[in-house]
Amino acid sequence: QLQLQESGPGLVKPSETLSLTCTVSGGSISSKDYYWGWLRQPPGKGLEWIASVFYTGTTYYSPSLKSRLTISVDTSKNQFSLSLNSVTAADTAVYYCARLQFLEWYQFDYWGQGTLVTVSS
Amino acid sequence: DIQMTQSPSSLSASVGDRVTLTCRASLPISTYLNWYQQKPGKAPKLLIYGASSLQSGIPSRFSGSGSGTDFTLTISSLQPEDFATYYCQQSYSAPPYTFGQGTKLEIK
């Protein structure tokens, strides 16, 4: 059974960089059938897609966050990572990693449990 | 970006009811529409993909329909575990993958 697990600091200071890693187990991140992505959900609000990466390193970013984002993949560790710089309180959210199946419909079919990141001094 | 609008924002219903949730896209998206269920403190769970295909392991009381701009998620007979928030998501003009604001389904 595929599992995804987010890890990283739960508290980040304003203007600093938020860094998260997603570890994939029970399957290979190097599959040609899937992208891997990050999404977030501010407290009490809806879902927002942030970025996606293919095992080859091809990346896609949310236009509204692109200037502050970096997503990367480490196939040797079966992990992918997110970096968001110059954070503000508006970046406080639960961050999810997820698998994006793109055989036909592009759906997020497996999700991590999510990790709350709070931006505060 | 394509905007997704869900209605209603919240809905009260009873166990055993048949309920229909609606999602509308700001532009036609064919059937590139997915539905997710989210319970408090949990990650979203994929229910329906491609507007009408049931994800593996999801009960058959869930069904989806629609194409173009208007879509529905129907729960044929509500069970206690179905009370949650439901999100639609388009993947036609993506990235970015955009979600609706959610419909919260509450117990009457």
Image: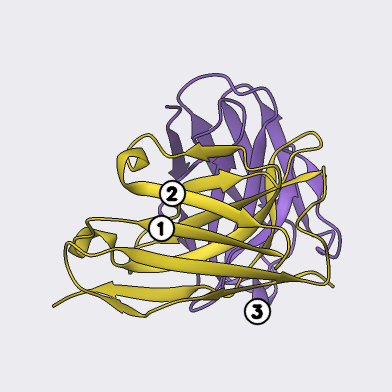
Helix, strand or loop status at disc 1: strand
Horizontal side of B52 relative to B68 (left or right) equals right
Measured as percent of width and height from the top left, residue A19 is found at: 41, 66
Please check whether the numbered discs 1 and 2 fall on a single chain: yes
Q: Residue furthest left?
A: A121
Q: Residue furthest front?
A: A76
Q: Which mark is residue B80?
A: 3
- Looking at the image, is A113 positioned above or below residue A78? below
**CA gap, disc 3 to disc 1?**
39 Å
Chain B colour is purple
Q: Is residue B45 visible?
A: yes
Please check whether the numbered discs 3 and 2 fall on a single chain: no
In this rendered view, identify the residue nearer to me: A71 or A105: A71
Chain painted in yellow in the figure: A
- Looking at the image, is B63 positioned above or below residue A91? above
Q: Residues within 10 Å of mark 3 (few under 14, many from 20)?
A: few
Helix, strand or loop status at disc 3: helix
Residue on which disc 2 sits = A70
Helix, strand or loop status at disc 2: strand
Is disc 3 in contact with disc 1, using a CB cutoff of under 8 Å?
Answer: no
> Tag 2: residue type?
Thr
> Tag 3: residue type?
Pro
Is disc 3 in contact with disc 2, using a CB cutoff of under 8 Å?
Answer: no
**CA gap, disc 3 to disc 2?**
41 Å
Q: Nearer the viewer, mark 3 or mark 2?
A: 2
Measured as percent of width and height from the top left, residue B11 is found at: 47, 60
- Looking at the image, is B68 positioned above or below residue B74? above
Residue on which disc 1 sits = A83
Q: Quadrant of residue A47?
A: bottom left
> Tag 1: residue type?
Ser
In this rendered view, identify the residue nearer to me: B10 or B91: B91
